[in-house]
Amino acid sequence: MKQLLFCSFILIFAVEGFCGEVNEPNDPVLLVQSKWDEVMNILRDRQMQEEMKAEKIAAIASPIFDFPLIAKLSLGRKHWPKLSEAQRETFTKLLVEHLKCSYSEKIAMYTNEEVVFKEAVKKKKNIIEIPLEMISKEKKIAIIHKLRETDKKWRIYDVEIEGVSILLTYRSQFDDILSRGTVEDLLSELQKPPDE
Protein backbone atom coordinates (compact mmCIF):
# COMPACT_ATOMS: atom_id res chain seq x y z
CA MET A 1 0.00 0.00 0.00
CA LYS A 2 2.88 2.36 0.78
CA GLN A 3 4.31 1.84 -2.69
CA LEU A 4 0.90 2.29 -4.29
CA LEU A 5 0.42 5.62 -2.55
CA PHE A 6 3.96 6.66 -3.40
CA CYS A 7 3.32 6.14 -7.08
CA SER A 8 0.76 8.93 -6.94
CA PHE A 9 3.44 11.52 -6.23
CA ILE A 10 4.01 12.39 -9.85
CA LEU A 11 0.44 13.62 -10.10
CA ILE A 12 0.43 15.32 -6.74
CA PHE A 13 3.63 17.28 -6.94
CA ALA A 14 2.66 18.98 -10.16
CA VAL A 15 1.18 21.87 -8.24
CA GLU A 16 3.17 24.98 -8.94
CA GLY A 17 1.09 26.11 -11.89
CA PHE A 18 -1.35 25.00 -14.54
CA CYS A 19 0.80 25.73 -17.53
CA GLY A 20 4.29 26.72 -18.51
CA GLU A 21 6.18 27.76 -21.60
CA VAL A 22 9.03 25.29 -21.58
CA ASN A 23 10.77 23.30 -24.26
CA GLU A 24 9.06 19.94 -23.84
CA PRO A 25 9.13 17.03 -26.30
CA ASN A 26 5.96 17.06 -28.39
CA ASP A 27 5.94 13.26 -28.57
CA PRO A 28 3.80 12.07 -25.62
CA VAL A 29 5.92 8.98 -24.93
CA LEU A 30 9.16 10.94 -24.91
CA LEU A 31 7.50 13.58 -22.75
CA VAL A 32 6.51 11.13 -20.00
CA GLN A 33 9.76 9.17 -20.22
CA SER A 34 11.91 12.29 -19.96
CA LYS A 35 9.95 13.54 -16.94
CA TRP A 36 10.21 10.17 -15.19
CA ASP A 37 13.97 10.13 -15.81
CA GLU A 38 14.34 13.58 -14.29
CA VAL A 39 12.19 12.68 -11.28
CA MET A 40 14.03 9.40 -10.69
CA ASN A 41 17.39 11.19 -10.72
CA ILE A 42 16.15 13.55 -8.01
CA LEU A 43 14.73 10.73 -5.89
CA ARG A 44 18.01 8.82 -6.08
CA ASP A 45 19.98 11.79 -4.74
CA ARG A 46 20.66 10.81 -1.14
CA GLN A 47 22.25 14.15 -0.32
CA MET A 48 19.17 16.19 -1.19
CA GLN A 49 16.65 17.06 1.53
CA GLU A 50 13.07 15.78 1.04
CA GLU A 51 11.65 19.30 0.93
CA MET A 52 14.04 20.26 -1.85
CA LYS A 53 13.17 17.07 -3.74
CA ALA A 54 9.50 17.96 -3.58
CA GLU A 55 10.18 21.47 -4.91
CA LYS A 56 12.29 20.20 -7.80
CA ILE A 57 9.76 17.52 -8.74
CA ALA A 58 6.99 20.11 -8.71
CA ALA A 59 8.94 22.28 -11.13
CA ILE A 60 9.55 19.31 -13.42
CA ALA A 61 6.03 17.91 -13.43
CA SER A 62 3.71 20.91 -13.33
CA PRO A 63 3.87 21.84 -17.04
CA ILE A 64 2.72 18.41 -18.22
CA PHE A 65 -0.51 18.13 -16.21
CA ASP A 66 -3.80 19.64 -17.37
CA PHE A 67 -5.27 20.62 -14.01
CA PRO A 68 -8.23 22.58 -15.39
CA LEU A 69 -9.27 19.47 -17.33
CA ILE A 70 -8.65 17.22 -14.33
CA ALA A 71 -10.88 19.45 -12.21
CA LYS A 72 -13.62 19.50 -14.85
CA LEU A 73 -13.56 15.73 -15.38
CA SER A 74 -13.48 15.01 -11.65
CA LEU A 75 -16.91 16.67 -11.35
CA GLY A 76 -18.21 15.40 -14.68
CA ARG A 77 -21.08 16.67 -16.80
CA LYS A 78 -23.48 16.24 -13.91
CA HIS A 79 -21.84 18.78 -11.56
CA TRP A 80 -19.30 20.95 -13.44
CA PRO A 81 -21.93 23.12 -15.23
CA LYS A 82 -23.46 24.01 -11.86
CA LEU A 83 -20.32 25.86 -10.73
CA SER A 84 -19.80 29.55 -11.41
CA GLU A 85 -16.48 30.67 -12.90
CA ALA A 86 -15.29 31.77 -9.46
CA GLN A 87 -16.29 28.42 -7.95
CA ARG A 88 -14.53 26.54 -10.74
CA GLU A 89 -11.32 28.46 -10.11
CA THR A 90 -11.54 27.91 -6.36
CA PHE A 91 -12.37 24.23 -6.78
CA THR A 92 -9.40 23.66 -9.09
CA LYS A 93 -6.97 25.33 -6.70
CA LEU A 94 -8.35 23.47 -3.69
CA LEU A 95 -8.29 20.14 -5.51
CA VAL A 96 -4.61 20.50 -6.40
CA GLU A 97 -3.72 21.58 -2.87
CA HIS A 98 -5.76 18.74 -1.41
CA LEU A 99 -3.89 16.21 -3.53
CA LYS A 100 -0.58 17.75 -2.54
CA CYS A 101 -1.38 17.51 1.16
CA SER A 102 -2.65 13.94 0.81
CA TYR A 103 0.54 12.53 -0.62
CA SER A 104 3.42 14.93 0.09
CA GLU A 105 5.01 12.60 2.64
CA LYS A 106 4.99 9.66 0.23
CA ILE A 107 8.03 10.90 -1.65
CA ALA A 108 10.26 9.59 1.14
CA MET A 109 9.09 6.03 0.46
CA TYR A 110 11.00 5.70 -2.79
CA THR A 111 13.40 2.74 -2.55
CA ASN A 112 15.06 2.67 -5.95
CA GLU A 113 12.40 0.80 -7.92
CA GLU A 114 13.14 0.11 -11.57
CA VAL A 115 10.83 1.78 -14.09
CA VAL A 116 9.98 -0.10 -17.29
CA PHE A 117 7.87 1.56 -20.00
CA LYS A 118 5.44 -0.53 -22.05
CA GLU A 119 4.11 0.12 -25.55
CA ALA A 120 1.82 3.15 -25.73
CA VAL A 121 -1.81 2.67 -26.75
CA LYS A 122 -3.53 5.30 -28.88
CA LYS A 123 -7.21 5.49 -27.88
CA LYS A 124 -8.27 8.37 -30.14
CA LYS A 125 -6.54 10.86 -32.40
CA ASN A 126 -5.85 13.12 -29.45
CA ILE A 127 -5.79 10.59 -26.58
CA ILE A 128 -3.01 8.17 -25.69
CA GLU A 129 -2.24 5.89 -22.76
CA ILE A 130 1.36 5.28 -21.70
CA PRO A 131 1.78 2.25 -19.41
CA LEU A 132 4.77 1.52 -17.22
CA GLU A 133 5.74 -0.77 -14.38
CA MET A 134 7.58 0.10 -11.21
CA ILE A 135 9.48 -3.03 -10.26
CA SER A 136 10.76 -3.69 -6.75
CA LYS A 137 11.88 -6.81 -4.93
CA GLU A 138 8.37 -7.32 -3.57
CA LYS A 139 6.13 -6.68 -6.58
CA LYS A 140 5.40 -4.93 -9.86
CA ILE A 141 3.15 -1.88 -9.80
CA ALA A 142 1.29 -1.07 -13.02
CA ILE A 143 0.81 2.62 -13.80
CA ILE A 144 -0.89 4.17 -16.82
CA HIS A 145 -0.53 7.84 -17.72
CA LYS A 146 -3.45 9.11 -19.79
CA LEU A 147 -2.70 12.09 -22.00
CA ARG A 148 -4.77 14.33 -24.25
CA GLU A 149 -3.49 16.66 -26.95
CA THR A 150 -4.86 20.19 -26.80
CA ASP A 151 -3.48 23.11 -28.80
CA LYS A 152 -0.74 20.81 -30.14
CA LYS A 153 0.50 20.01 -26.61
CA TRP A 154 0.20 16.69 -24.81
CA ARG A 155 -0.85 16.89 -21.16
CA ILE A 156 -1.70 14.26 -18.54
CA TYR A 157 -5.31 14.26 -17.36
CA ASP A 158 -5.39 11.04 -15.34
CA VAL A 159 -3.10 8.45 -13.75
CA GLU A 160 -4.27 4.88 -13.23
CA ILE A 161 -2.45 2.84 -10.58
CA GLU A 162 -3.04 -0.90 -10.34
CA GLY A 163 -6.30 -0.48 -12.24
CA VAL A 164 -7.55 2.38 -10.04
CA SER A 165 -8.07 5.75 -11.73
CA ILE A 166 -7.22 8.72 -9.51
CA LEU A 167 -9.64 10.82 -11.55
CA LEU A 168 -12.57 8.42 -11.20
CA THR A 169 -11.86 7.89 -7.51
CA TYR A 170 -12.22 11.59 -6.87
CA ARG A 171 -15.27 11.84 -9.13
CA SER A 172 -17.01 9.22 -7.02
CA GLN A 173 -16.14 11.03 -3.80
CA PHE A 174 -17.22 14.43 -5.14
CA ASP A 175 -20.46 13.03 -6.54
CA ASP A 176 -21.29 11.62 -3.12
CA ILE A 177 -20.71 14.99 -1.44
CA LEU A 178 -22.69 16.94 -4.05
CA SER A 179 -25.55 14.45 -4.06
CA ARG A 180 -26.05 15.13 -0.36
CA GLY A 181 -25.03 18.79 -0.22
CA THR A 182 -23.98 21.91 -2.11
CA VAL A 183 -20.95 23.18 -4.00
CA GLU A 184 -19.98 25.14 -0.89
CA ASP A 185 -20.03 21.87 1.07
CA LEU A 186 -17.60 20.39 -1.43
CA LEU A 187 -15.27 23.38 -1.27
CA SER A 188 -15.40 23.27 2.51
CA GLU A 189 -14.57 19.57 2.45
CA LEU A 190 -11.55 20.16 0.21
CA GLN A 191 -10.25 22.76 2.65
CA LYS A 192 -10.03 20.20 5.41
CA PRO A 193 -6.79 18.31 6.07
CA PRO A 194 -6.86 15.01 4.08
CA ASP A 195 -6.91 12.77 7.16
CA GLU A 196 -9.82 14.60 8.78
Image (cartoon, rainbow, N blue to C red):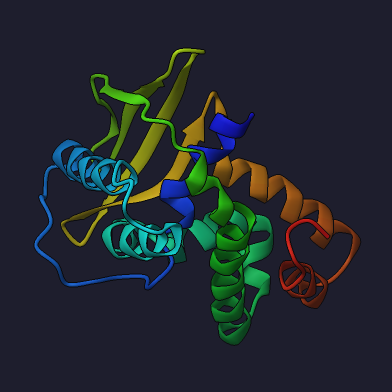
- Residue 129, located in which quarter of the rendered image? top left
Residue found at x 36% / y 57% = 65
Residue found at x 16% / y 72% = 21
Residue found at x 57% / y 68% = 97
Left or right: where 106 falls relative to 181 = left
Residue 194: give x, y in percent of width and height.
73, 59
Q: Quadrant of the C terminus?
A: bottom right
Residue found at the very far front of the displayed protein? 47
Q: Is residue 136 above or below residue 31?
A: above
Residue 155: give x, y in percent of width and height.
30, 53
Q: Quadrant of the N terminus?
A: top right
Residue found at the very far right of the displayed protein? 180
Residue 60: give x, y in percent of width and height.
27, 59
- Residue 50, located in which quarter of the rendered image? bottom left
Question: Quick one: 16 or 50, which is closer to the camera?
Answer: 50
Left or right: where 194 falls relative to 180 = left
Residue 6: give x, y in percent of width and height.
52, 39
Count of marks placed on residues: 0
Question: Quick one: 186 or 3, which is closer to the camera?
Answer: 3
Q: Is residue 94 above or below residue 77?
A: below
Question: Quick one: 103 or 132, which is closer to the camera?
Answer: 103
- Residue 19, located in which quarter of the rendered image? bottom left
Residue found at x 45% / y 37% = 110
